[in-house]
Image (spheres, helix red, strand yellow):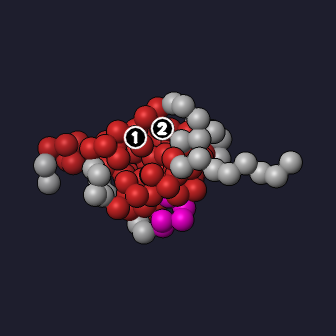
Amino acid sequence: MDSRAADRAGALADLEADGGTDTLSIADCRQALGRHAEAVKSYDAYLRHSRSLDVVYRRGVSRFAIGDRAGALEDFSRACLDEGSPRTAAMDFIQQHPGDPMSAVLQEALRPKPEAPR
C-alpha cells in the first residue's frame, strides 16, 4: 500500500472510530481507496441532508466504478446541468481521458436535453 493509501486508510479508521458522523469525509476516503460501493452508501447518507452538486458528481464517479452506468449518468446529468465545478471537472476529465468509458458517460450527461413541450 502506498503512503497516500495508508494515509487514507488511517484517516478512514479514525473517522469511523470517531462515530462515523462525518459521512462526506468517510465517503471521500472510501472512494480514494477504491471502496466504491461503500462510498456510494456514504454519499447517499450525506446527500440526505445536502444538495451539493459536487457530492452528487463524486457519487456518480463511484456509481460508475461499480458498474451502475444509469445511476452515474443520472448523477452526472444533475451535477453538470449548470455552470460550476462539477461541469468543469467533467469537461476536464473528458479532455484528459478521451478514450475512457467514463468520458462517454460524461459526454452524454453534458449533451443538451430537449425542452419539454409547453
**Residue 87, disc:** 2
The one nearer the camera, 15 or 71, is: 71
Circle 1 packing at 10 Å, graded few (<14), some (14-19), many (20+), is: some
The one nearer the camera, 102 or 40, is: 102
Q: Can you give x and y, in whole percent of width and height, for residue 31 in the image?
A: 36, 52
Residue 4, image quadrant? top left
Q: Can you give x and y, in whole percent of width and height, for residue 13 in the image?
A: 33, 48
Question: Residue sitting at 54 percent across and 61 percent down?
Answer: 71
Q: Secondary structure at mark 1?
A: helix
Query: Which residue reaches farthest left?
Result: 2
The one nearer the camera, 113 or 50, is: 113
Q: Are marks 2 and 1 in contact (CB under 8 Å)?
A: yes
Q: Is residue 36 visible?
A: no
Q: Can you give x and y, in whole percent of width and height, for residue 9 in the image?
A: 27, 49
The one nearer the camera, 103 or 46, is: 103
Left or right, 31 with respect to 23, comes to left
Q: Is residue 69 magenta?
A: yes
71 up-or-down from 17: above or below: below
Residue at numbered disc 1? 91
Residue 93, image quadrant? top left
**Residue 117, disc:** none
84 up-or-down from 64: above or below: above
The tally of labels here is 2
Question: Residue sitting at 48 percent across and 67 percent down?
Answer: 68
Q: Amino acid at mark 1?
A: Met
Circle 2 packing at 10 Å, graded few (<14), some (14-19), many (20+), is: many
Q: Amino acid at mark 2?
A: Arg
Q: Is residue 63 magenta?
A: no
Q: Is residue 16 visible?
A: yes
Characterize the magenta stretch by its predominant secondary structure: helix
State which region is magenta.
68-72
48 up-or-down from 66: above or below: above
